[in-house]
Image (tube, grey):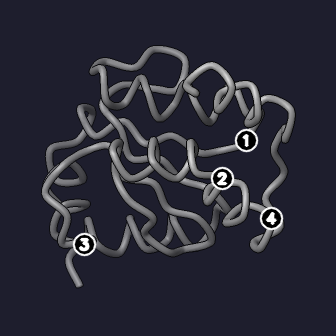
């Protein structure tokens, strides 16, 4: 494994929810990263953000690690969940709630319902 892959593995193993994104959860630097971070923040999910713009090795390394070409990328309990479109779909269908519940990840169910109501 490369240094980047080792660092990624340590990060996703050591944190319940990790979002590899452009920017940070408080200051996203692309619309897709902003959407996913916004959903997680609104739902009150405690997550670790990794700014891929700060390290080119991580930026390319996460794409190689997951075999997924785009950023953001969400990991829950060490497992790759998906990017912006997948997370959006999972949020609207309730699948993200189920994933969090099954993995013991705390979130605000009322906030999740408000997202669905606003997009109905």
Quick one: SS at disc 1? Answer: loop
Residue with the mark numbered 3: 65
Query: How far, Cα to Cα, is label 2 from label 3?
Result: 27 Å
Question: Do the residues under discs 3 and 1 have CB atoms within 8 angstroms?
Answer: no
Chain-order first, disc 1 or disc 4: 1
Q: Is residue 8 above or below residue 25?
A: below
Q: Nearer the viewer, mark 2 or mark 3?
A: 2
Question: What crowding class fits label 3: few (fewer than 14 Cα within 10 Å), some (14-19), or many (20 or more)?
Answer: some
Quick one: SS at disc 3? Answer: helix
Query: How far, Cα to Cα, is label 3 from label 1?
Result: 24 Å
Q: Position of residue 53 (x, y in %)?
A: 23, 32
Q: Position of residue 60 (x, y in %)?
A: 13, 55
Chain-order first, disc 4 or disc 3: 3
Residue extending furthest toward the bottom: 1
Chain-order first, disc 3 or disc 1: 1
Query: How far, Cα to Cα, is label 2 from label 4?
Result: 11 Å
Q: Nearer the viewer, mark 1 or mark 4?
A: 4
Residue with the mark numbered 2: 94
Residue with the mark numbered 4: 101
Q: Nearer the viewer, mark 2 or mark 4?
A: 2
Horizontal side of 21 relative to 93 (left or right) equals left
Q: Position of residue 4 (x, y in %)?
A: 26, 65
Question: Do the residues under discs 2 and 4 have CB atoms within 8 angstroms?
Answer: no
Residue with the mark numbered 1: 45
Quick one: SS at disc 4? Answer: helix
Dividing the picture into quadrants, the one containing residue 62 is: bottom left
Question: Do the residues under discs 1 and 4 have CB atoms within 8 angstroms?
Answer: no
Chain-order first, disc 2 or disc 3: 3
């Amino acid at each position: 494994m490369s240094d980047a892959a080792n660092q990624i593995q340590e990060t996703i193993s050591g944190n319940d929810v990790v979002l590899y994104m452009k920017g940070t959860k408080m200051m996203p630097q692309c619309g897709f990263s902003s959407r996913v971070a916004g959903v997680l923040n609104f739902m009150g999910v405690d997550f670790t953000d990794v700014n891929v713009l700060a390290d080119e090795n991580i930026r390319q390394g996460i794409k190689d690690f997951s075999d997924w070409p785009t950023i953001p990328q969400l990991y829950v309990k060490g497992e790759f969940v998906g990017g912006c479109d997948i997370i959006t779909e999972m949020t609207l269908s309730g699948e993200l709630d189920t994933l969090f519940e099954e993995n013991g990840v705390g979130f605000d169910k009322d906030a999740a319902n408000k997202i669905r109501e606003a997009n109905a």
